[in-house]
Amino acid sequence: MAKQLVLVRHGKSDWSTNGMTDFERPLNHRGNKNAPEMAERISKRNLIPELLVSSPAKRALTTAKHFSDTWDMPKDKIQKEPAIYEANTTALLQVVNRFDNQHNRIALFGHNPGLTDFVNFLADAHIYTIPTAGVVYIDFPFDDWSMVSHHTGSLLLFDYPKNTALI
């Protein structure tokens, strides 16, 4: 069975609290609204992943929880992966290459600029930036996550909250 990677940028975050670390920054109102909306769009396409893997940063984990709630997935289906936080392409590739092959569709919740760079590295997608709460699906023609590498994927879907073309 071919593999499919779902990359989700965390929702819009709240910058209003002074003294808070970047890691602790929560979602703002729009972020809490957009994440379930995007999860619902994915539901309508029957493209729900089997496993969710998230940066442990508060805004990414909260986004993953919104998606899991919308998809009626138990919270324990969200794996925290510290290597995703502030990750570059090399670090993200190492995370993906270690995924368990029993899962064919996995969602990774993370941050920019790393996610956008990673999408373009994997699929030659020419995406300028993945907006907050944006979702990208990439298909891979093999059944082993360790084979995922430079330009081995094909862009299947790129959607984001302000995109009206796909609704």
Image (cartoon, helix red, strand yellow):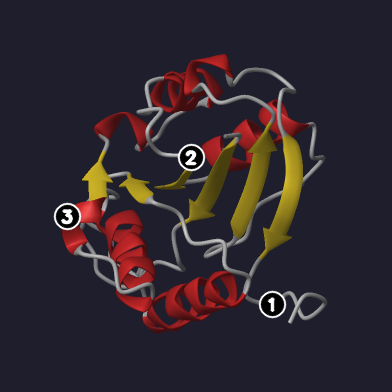
Q: Give the percent coordinates (x, y) of residue 157.
A: 72, 56
Q: Give the percent coordinates (x, y) of residue 61.
A: 28, 57
Amino acid type, mark 2: Asn
- From the viewer's side, name the closer residue of 96 and 30: 96
Q: Give the percent coordinates (x, y) of residue 109.
A: 42, 50
- From the viewer's side, name the closer residue of 142 and 25: 142
Q: Nearer the viewer, mark 3 or mark 2?
A: 2
Q: What residue is pinned by disc 3?
A: 76
Q: Dot 1: within a 10 Å radius of its alpha carbon, few (fewer than 14), some, or many (20 or more) residues?
A: few
Residue depicted at x 45% and y 73%: 35
Q: CA distance from mark 3 to mark 1?
A: 30 Å
Residue depicted at x 55% and y 26%: 143
Amino acid type, mark 1: Lys
Q: In which quadrant of the rendered view does residue 2 lie?
A: top right
Residue depicted at x 57% and y 15%: 147
Q: Dot 2: within a 10 Å radius of its alpha carbon, few (fewer than 14), some, or many (20 or more) residues?
A: many
State whether residue 32 is above or below residue 85. below
Q: Nearer the viewer, mark 3 or mark 1?
A: 3
Q: What residue is pinned by disc 1?
A: 162
Q: What residue is pinned by disc 2?
A: 104
Q: Dot 3: within a 10 Å radius of its alpha carbon, few (fewer than 14), some, or many (20 or more) residues?
A: few
Q: Give the percent coordinates (x, y) of residue 50.
A: 39, 51
Between discs 2 and 1, the one toward the N terminus: 2
Between discs 3 and 1, the one toward the N terminus: 3
